[in-house]
Amino acid sequence: MRGEDERSGLLFSYVDLEARVGKDHPLRTIRGVVNDAPAALPQEFSALYAPIGRLRSRRRSSCERCFCRPLERLEFDLPFRWFVGLGVDDAVWDHSAFSKNRDRLLEGDLVLTQPPRMKRLLSTDHFSVDGTLVEAWASTKSFRPRDGSGEPPEGGGPNREADFHGQKRSNETHAATTDPEARLYRKGPGKEAKLCFMGRALMENRNGLVVDACLSEANGHAERIAALHMIEPRADRLRLITLGADKG
C-alpha cells in the first residue's frame, strides 16, 4: 500500500510475555531443563559463584563480541526475554557481567546428562551444517616469514606502520607470531584476507537446535571434513539420514 509511514504509539501498553511464547515452543522445554540444572548440581554451582573471584579482565576479541550478540537480541526479541526472565521494561545486563558468568560455566567443566524431554526436541534423521569465519586475535602485521627473514615494521608501539604492497604472503611461507595456528583466508573472491579460523555448527532440522559444533583451521576443505566428522556418530547403517549444506 502507498502512503506515509506514520505511527502513533499508545501512551500505555501491556505485553504479556507468557502469551507470546507458544505452548509447544521448544524454549519452554529448554527453560525447564536450565532451571533444573542448579538443583541437580548445587555444590558445583555454589563453587562457581564463590565470593572471591578468579576471573581476569581481558580485551574483547571478535569472538568475544559474537558471544555478546545474544544481549543485543534481548533488546527486541520477546521469547528471549521470556526465557531469561526479563520483563519488557527491564534493562538488559551489561556485556561484561554476561561474559564473566559464561566463563564461570566454561571453567567449571560441568557435565549434565541430557534428560529424555530434551531428546524429544531433536531430530535424529535430518540435519544441516553451516560454517563461518572466526577472526583470530592476531594482527596481520604479525604475519611474517617462517624462516625469520622478515623485517619488523618500522617505528615503535603496538600499532607500528607496515606496508605489504607487492609482497607475496601465503600460509606456506608465513605464520602469525602472535597466533601461529591462525591462517590467512578470504571468504570469497574480492574479499579481504584475514587471519582467522573456521567455525561450524551441526543443527537438527526439527527445531533448528545446535547438536554439535567445532573450530578448525581455515582452509578450502575444512568445512566438508568437519561436517562428515560431526555427522558420523549419528549415522546408522539401518536407516537413512539426510545432511543439508550450502555449496561451500
Image (cartoon, grey):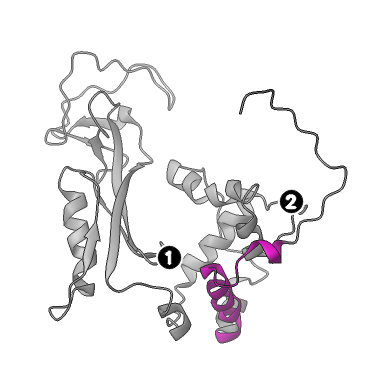
Place of residue 190 in the rendered image (x, y in percent of width and height, measured from the top left): 25, 23
In this picture, residue 225 sits left or right of residue 187: left
State whether the magenta stretch is mostly helix, strand or loop: helix
Earlier residue among tags 1 and 2:
2
Place of residue 131 in the rendered image (x, y in percent of width and height, measured from the top left): 30, 49
Residue in view at x 88 percent, y 42 percent: 11
- Which residue is label 1 attached to? 207
- Which residue is label 2 attached to? 91
Query: Label 1: how many residues lie within 10 Å, few (<14), some (14-19) or many (20+)?
Result: few
Please state the extent of the stretch shown in magenta in the rendering: 17-40
Real-space CA distance between mark 1 and mark 2, rounded to the nearest whole angstrom: 29 Å
Residue type, mark 1 in image: Asn
In this picture, residue 133 sits left or right of residue 58: left
Residue in view at x 17 percent, y 53 percent: 224
Residue in view at x 21 percent, y 57 percent: 226
The answer to whether 230 is drawn above or below residue 78 in the figure is: below
